Image (cartoon, helix red, strand yellow):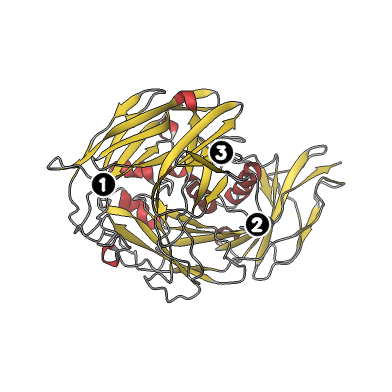
Amino acid sequence: MKRFMLLLLITAVTGWLLAGCGGGGRREIAISGTVTDIAGNLVPGAEIRLDDRLVTKSLMNGTYKISRLSAGLHNVDASGDVNGELWAGSRWVDVFIDGPTMNMNIIIGPVGDLGTIEGTVTDLSNNPIPDARIIAVARYPQDRAADEASVVSKVEVADSAGHFEMDDLPGSITVGGQTEEIIYDVIASSAGLSGQARGFENQTKTVTVAGGQITRVDFTLESSTDVIPTVPPGWTSSGALDIISYTVPKTITTRAVQSAYDAVKSSISERTRKAVALRRGTGRAAPPGALIENNVIWYSIWNPFFGIDVPSNLAGFTIYRGTTSNLQQTGQFRIDFARDPAIVTYADTSRELTDGVTYWYAVSAVSTSYLDADDLFNPAAESEMSFPVSVTPLGRLQAVSPGDGAFVNTLTPTFSWGQVPGARTYKVFIYDDYPIVDALFTPQGDPQRPDHLPAWGESETVTGTSAVFSDPNFPLVQDHEYWWVVMAADSTDFDFANAYAISELRSFVIR
């Protein structure tokens, strides 16, 4: 099961929203997701086709939404111009009748470098396993640590003969001018359907692809031996989940700004850097209008468990959210099902999230028998919920001075901002350059810095609405353009707060 250590950052490419959000509300049959390139960068303006029919384009933040769909399988294609070259990608989407289907992310790559994985999925008696899910997950080049990877993932569905054909898989990726071959871990997973007592155990194989060529991969799956997957020790104890909430000052509409705010979040601490890396691996961007992102993480408890004995009948995880600590495993609180056996984080970017409201989250592990005889969610295939965790998102933070593009006349400038209800401490961060996290988390500044960001300095943590910046490890110099933000935290321990608010990113020059 060691290969699963490489999959800790698999995107939630096969999530299904099985029931409405905690507050109820109208449901619609729709799908939504993001379009990214093979490095994880968001792609705006990509043409989206549903069953070979052009229906929409991705927005400035790479997201798309298709409404008024019929239930069942649909093929979704995306294509767009990346640096003057045609890139394309596609995926199957299984639409359920009882609510919208989210996280249907599409990875696109250069058309001339796209290969195919083809094969069959059968049981031990050589009978085909129709509707089996096949998930291809790209390893990061040079086997970088999983939490620093930005991966390519794709899913296909086997037909009635157990046959699948996975097109549009990039064969390589270029990083820093060096082209690296992409290695794919391909997982076959089949959940119990239509009255089956149980599904099948997952199987993983490792392959590479080449542009214009077909790579053959066949799977033989064994029946699941357990109905409910085993969860790690401590799953129902305090500390099973971690949560970090971020509130941004305005809607993020470009991938450059999205990357800048990810860089800002990453510079807080090792904990937040890892949380950002995990979330970026999902390829999920906040939808238009979303100002709050609640990141639920079970990496710390599940990670060592993955290295020991990953339940082979694990289909994925169900996410619960409510405004009470008394969460229950019902449709009232169930907000999403990430059908991915190795996902270890979930980014809740619902527009329903409101600052000042306390939200409780819990997660359960779900077996490959997750559907019942009517193809509906099967509570008998679900583990106990994790110990719940809560967060109260902060309101928006407004920077006051210096203004954007301002000139200042001192090497120890004073920064000021507006007060945020619920915040207990504040800190100013100054960056040597515009803070963008590379999609692959490769070094942009000092390669010795674990965060792979441009050099930055930090003010002392303060409780008021102003601070004088004087960091001996980051002396400011004249005639250099710097970028700065102020962040608010809901804790006196700034590095380990649960909720942060981030001001707009501004520049200044010292005369």
Instruction: Locate residue 407 relative to residue 73 in the image: left or right.
Output: right
Amino acid at pointer 1: Asn
The residue where tag 1 is placed is 202
The residue where tag 3 is placed is 47
Amino acid at pointer 2: Val
User: Few, some or many C-alpha atoms within 10 Å of disc 1 (few <14, some 14-19, many ≥20)?
Assistant: many
| Residue sitting at x 55%, y 60% | 350
* Residues under numbered marks 2 and 3 in contact, where contact means CB atoms less than 8 Å apart: no
| Residue 323 picture location, percent across and down | 51, 73
| Residue 298 picture location, percent across and down | 41, 57
For the N terminus, give its image quadrant: top left
Amino acid at pointer 3: Glu
The numbered mark at residue 245 is none
What distance separates the C-alpha of mark 1 from that of mark 2? 39 Å
The quadrant where residue 59 appears: top right
Is residue 36 shown above or below 500?
A: above
- Residue 210 visible: yes
Q: Secondary structure at mark 2?
A: loop
Is residue 41 shown above or below 241?
A: above
What distance separates the C-alpha of mark 3 from that of mark 1? 34 Å
In the rendered structure, which disc, 3 or 1, sits on the residue that comes first in sequence? 3
In the rendered structure, which disc, 1 or 2, sits on the residue that comes first in sequence? 1
What distance separates the C-alpha of mark 2 from that of mark 3? 28 Å
- Residue 145 visible: no
User: Few, some or many C-alpha atoms within 10 Å of disc 2 (few <14, some 14-19, many ≥20)?
Assistant: many
Foreground disc of the pair 3, 1 = 3
In the rendered structure, which disc, 2 or 3, sits on the residue that comes first in sequence? 3
Foreground disc of the pair 1, 2 = 1
Is residue 330 shown above or below 371?
A: below
* Residues under numbered marks 3 and 1 in contact, where contact means CB atoms less than 8 Å apart: no
User: In the orientation shown, which residue stands out farthest toward the left?
Assistant: 125
The residue where tag 2 is placed is 248
